[in-house]
Amino acid sequence: MELFFDQFPVVFQSLNVGFLQTLKLFMVTLVGAIPLGLIISFGSMSRFRPLSCLVKLIVAVIRGTPLMIQLLIIYFFPGLVLDNPIWGSGESGRFLAASVAFIINYACYFSEIYRGGIQSVPVGQQEAGLVLGMTKGQIFLRVTLLQMVKHIIPPMSNEVITLVKDTSLARIIALQEIIWAGQSFMKGSHGIAGAIWPLFFTAVYYLIFNGILTVLLGRLEKKLNYFR
């Protein structure tokens, strides 16, 4: 027990640093994937057949393959195959590659949620907007978008919670997120070796973070009840 209390400050500090990296990857992914997913959904619904087919194919490939494989390909392919290590070296390079992989992956998932939300809005409401002299842009912003938000909040919330846990996959390219930090104490980090208990504390970080997100997203959903 005395050894635990001696090690705890070192472990706690390392886990905090790892969690900040996890939190940063989570935020960057959301900021990039939410608007990109909307753009991709427009492409998949485009009346220009070649564009919609191409976008749907890309979405199918991204959704049909593991995120871990995508991380490995995006990080290693430029350097090993093209002989052009565009991500650079060090932690910043690994974070940039992980961010790109996560944004592309989650944008494709979000795009399908957006598409379902947009198509759930009755076409008659859009036609009514045209009759009233509204432009297509005004119809989307004032009619379609507002109703779409209510429909997409529950599935988007599920994806956001999944994203929190998926950030742990970034350790495959040695990004020092929270699980990487916890696991390092099994291998001799900071003079501590063979300690498995830090991994249990990483689960506590995930539980608290997901709990906060669940409460916030639940409140957001309740505030949008007026769309019913």
Image (cartoon, rainbow, N blue to C red):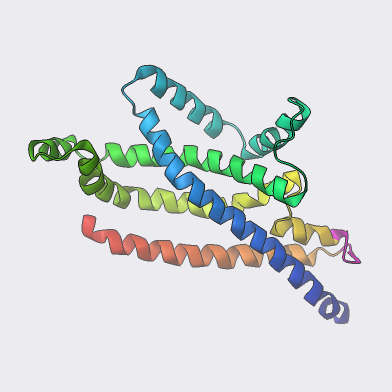
**What percent of the width, then of the height, locates residue 63?**
53, 34
Of the 4 image quadrants, the one containing the C terminus is: bottom left
**What percent of the width, then of the height, locates residue 61?**
54, 28
Name the one closer to the observer, 140 or 120.
140
On whether residue 193 falls in the magenta region, the answer is yes
Apparent side of residue 92 relative to residue 228 in the rendered image (left or right): right
**What percent of the width, then of the height, locates residue 86?**
70, 36
Residue at 57% across, 68% down: 208
36 over 193 or under it: above or below: above
What is the quadrant of residue 39 in the picture?
Answer: top left
Which residue occupies the extreme left position in the image?
Answer: 131
Residue at 28% across, 59% down: 224
185 over 107 or under it: above or below: below
Residue at 59% across, 65% down: 207
**What percent of the width, then of the height, locates residue 146?**
26, 50
What is the quadrant of residue 127 in the picture?
Answer: top left
On whether residue 81 falls in the magenta region, the answer is no
What is the quadrant of residue 157 in the picture?
Answer: bottom left
Apparent side of residue 204 relative to residue 209 in the rendered image (left or right): right
For residue 153, say whether it is visible. yes
Magenta highlight range: 186-194
